[in-house]
Image (cartoon, helix red, strand yellow):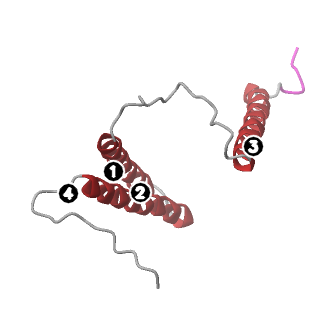
Amino acid sequence: MKKITPNPPASEARSDAETSDITQLSDTTERTVSSRLRNPKCPDPISHVFTLLPDIDTPTLLAHACETLASLNVMTTDLACELEGSRRNVALAIPQLSVLAELLVNRALDNLDPPEGLPEVTSTNTAA
């Protein structure tokens, strides 16, 4: 005997469950971020996924941040090559921002330990 109405695809049932999970996760994240913005003295939620040891020196942290930004630059540039239109423009803006951040980190490293032969950078901030 043939069935007249087809069964709905199993993926639709999964997508409804995934949508509710994403919505629930989004609501939880929004509550956490909102409470942090309302009360900056509220401690950050503890996450043990990524943890830095407390005794790592500043130059080491900055060096790793610089390497991470360089990797981000390469990955997003590769991604942008696969995109077109406005999505490509957005993807190309990410490497530009990462290069800017990398320049800032490198300057901070130079301020902490100037390279051989270069004078130490001094602050020239003056009030106008």
**In the rendered structure, which segment of residues is drawn in magenta?**
1-6
CA distance separating discs 3 and 2: 28 Å
CA distance separating discs 2 and 4: 22 Å
Tag 2: residue type?
Ser
CA distance separating discs 4 and 1: 21 Å
CA distance separating discs 1 and 3: 33 Å
Tag 4: residue type?
Pro
Tag 1: residue type?
Ala
**Residue named by callout 2:** 98
Contact (CB < 8 A) between labels 1 and 3?
no
Q: In the figure, is residue 74 to the left or right of 116?
A: right
**Residue named by callout 1:** 70
Q: Nearer the viewer, mark 4 or mark 1?
A: 4
Relative image position of residue 33 (x, y in whole percent) = 70, 44
CA distance separating discs 2 and 1: 7 Å
Ranked by sequence position, the earlier of labels 2 and 1 is 1
Residue in view at x 90 percent, y 26 percent: 4
Q: Residues within 10 Å of mark 2 (few under 14, many from 20)?
A: many
Relative image position of residue 116 (x, y in whole percent) = 11, 57
Q: Is residue 48 above or below residue 85?
A: above
Ranked by sequence position, the earlier of labels 2 and 4 is 2
Q: Which mark is residue 41?
A: none
**Residue named by callout 4:** 114
Ranked by sequence position, the earlier of labels 4 and 1 is 1
**Residue named by callout 3:** 35
Ranked by sequence position, the earlier of labels 3 and 4 is 3
Relative image position of residue 48 (x, y in whole percent) = 54, 24
Q: Residues within 10 Å of mark 4 (few under 14, many from 20)?
A: some
Ranked by sequence position, the earlier of labels 1 and 3 is 3
